[in-house]
Amino acid sequence: MRELPLPIVVAVNGVAAGAGMGFALAGDIVLAARSARFIQAFIKIGLAPDAGSSYWLPRLVGPVRARALAMTGDALSADGAVQVAGAIVEGHGGRLLTDHDPVGL
């Protein structure tokens, strides 16, 4: 993803857990609905972080916060993602994209 010549915009409407969070972390711009949650769920099933999480998370939130998120599996709210990683949060609680929105343009 990081080698593409165009920026990647990630939209998170609900929960981005495990590999979903890893993909979100790899985006150039992360848009999140107020209802969005980011969770490193790997610990809850006895796995180590994967899908790029172990690379991107410490670079975006710092090593101490990254370890805490990875070792506890606690959720990071959309507002928390703004504070620690610079995500952009949509003002209302609705979905950022609907089934009728064009994707990939």
Image (cartoon, helix red, strand yellow):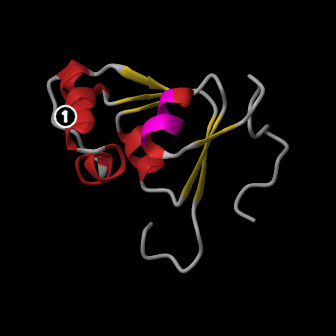
In the picture, measured across the screen, residue 37 lies left or right of residue 41, that is right
Q: Is residue 29 above or below residue 53?
A: below
**Residue that lies at the very extreme toward the front in this rendered image:** 83
Query: Which residue reaches farthest right?
Result: 100
* Quadrant assignment for the N terminus: bottom left
Q: Position of residue 39 (x, y in %)?
A: 38, 27
Disc 1: which residue: 67
Q: Position of residue 16 (x, y in %)?
A: 47, 33
The magenta region covers 80-84
Q: Is residue 6 left or right of residue 49?
A: right
Location of residue 60 with respect to 89 vertically, above or below: below
Q: Quadrant of the C terminus?
A: bottom right
Three-letter amino acid code at the position of disc 1: Arg
Q: Main secondary structure of the magenta part?
A: helix
Q: Is residue 15 visible?
A: no
**Identity of the residue furthest to the bottom in this view:** 5
Rendered image quadrant of residue 3: bottom left
